[in-house]
Image (spheres, coloured by chain):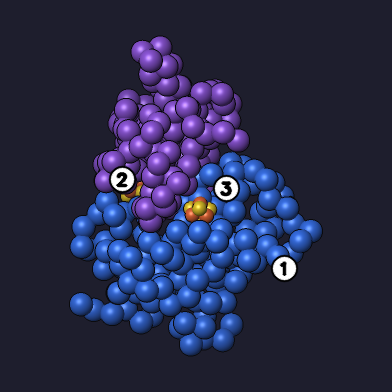
Amino acid sequence: MTIVKDKVGVVSCSGEDLPEGTISRIATRLVLEKLRPHDTVTICLPLFLAGSEDERAFARVFPTIAVDGCDKRCAEVGTKEYSGKPVAVIVVSEIMKKYPHLKTKSRDNLSAEEKKLAIKVAEEIAAKVDEILGRKK
Amino acid sequence: MLKDGKVFVIPCSGIGKALGTVGRAAMYEVVEKLRPNEATTVCLPLLTIRDEAVLKLARNNSCISVDGCPFQCARKNIESSKGKLVASFVVTDVLRENRGLKPEGVTELGPKGLKLASILAEKIAGRIDEINNNR
Ligand code: SF4
Ligand code: SF4
């Protein structure tokens, strides 16, 4: 198996039921599309169970960050169980403690405030990507 | 909010594909606007990690899977959890019937993607009515 060292996997929980899950998903997409598009790859989390060995190899091929909405840590637990141990975990509800003025309530369309929080989470993921790749930005 | 007794609409939310976002958007339209008293959702990953409370809900209540693509991850996660799967939708099937409504991207579906989600939401709501009428 080839181990890829110049790209980082980012696996987000989908958190349909909680606003934090939506933040985790949007923040992950921000990293993939805007902040670190050349350094990151992703996979749909439920594919670990539904897919084949090829999909399950993901976290063994890429050093992987799990991004979770809440303390249930589904992305971390699921990635570890089906694929490989994530090298880092980001939990939205933990990051939110640093920004008590930013509130989340919608699960669907993010408000301006929720978008701000998603950007903060995305910046933390991007910083972790840089750390894993041994880069200073 | 009490979830027991409602129909569970569970999308895959596939982050790697825009069609996963269409399924997710359709689910919110159903559970928040079209059938808020009859339908609800849970985080699909809780089934993936075998969370006891969510396994129980999925086994005791009717579940509808909504998947972005033919991998059908939500359906397979519900089935392998022994959830009570009563219907399955796949966004690619609805897109085939509405070829002009290709979504723009994973984060922003754009007007066409949102329209596609609304068409799917109506289909899901219709199925919920059938399920409840046959109870
Ligand atoms: S980590 Fe929390 S928000 Fe994310 S899928 Fe699991 S229960 Fe839902
Ligand atoms: S069904 Fe397709 S879009 Fe949805 S999670 Fe699976 S691979 Fe991703």
Q: Is mark 3 within 8 Å of ligand 1?
A: yes
Which residue was labeled with disc 1?
Answer: A98
Residue A129 in the image: state x and y as whole percent. Answer: 50, 76
Tell me the blue chain: A
Q: Which residue is at 42% across, 21% downward?
A: B128
Residue A54 in the image: state x and y as whole percent. Answer: 22, 63
Q: Which residue is at 40% across, 31% downward?
A: B61
Identify which amino acid the numbered label 1 is placed on.
Lys
What's the CA distance linking mark 1 and mark 2? 36 Å
Q: Nearer the viewer, residue B36 or B106?
A: B36
Which residue was labeled with disc 2?
Answer: B81
Which numbered disc flags the more N-terminal residue, 1 or 3? 3
Which residue was labeled with disc 3?
Answer: A18
Kindly state the secondary structure of the residue where label 3 is placed.
loop
For disc 2, the neighbor class at 10 Å (few under 14, some 14 to 19, many from 20) is: some
Examine the image and state in which quarter residue B19 appears. top left
Check if mark 3 and mark 2 are on a common chain. Answer: no
For disc 1, the neighbor class at 10 Å (few under 14, some 14 to 19, many from 20) is: few
For disc 3, the neighbor class at 10 Å (few under 14, some 14 to 19, many from 20) is: some
Q: Is mark 2 within 8 Å of ligand 1?
A: no
**Quarter that holds the N terminus of chain B:** top right
Please say whether residue B83 is visible from this viewpoint.
yes
Q: Is residue A81 above or below residue A3?
A: above
Which chain is home to disc 3? A
Q: Is residue B122 above or below residue B68?
A: above
- Which color has been applied to chain B in this rendered view? purple
Residue A95 in the image: state x and y as whole percent. Answer: 65, 66
What's the CA distance linking mark 3 and mark 2? 21 Å
Kindly state the secondary structure of the residue where label 1 is placed.
loop
Residue B30 in the image: state x and y as whole percent. Answer: 51, 28
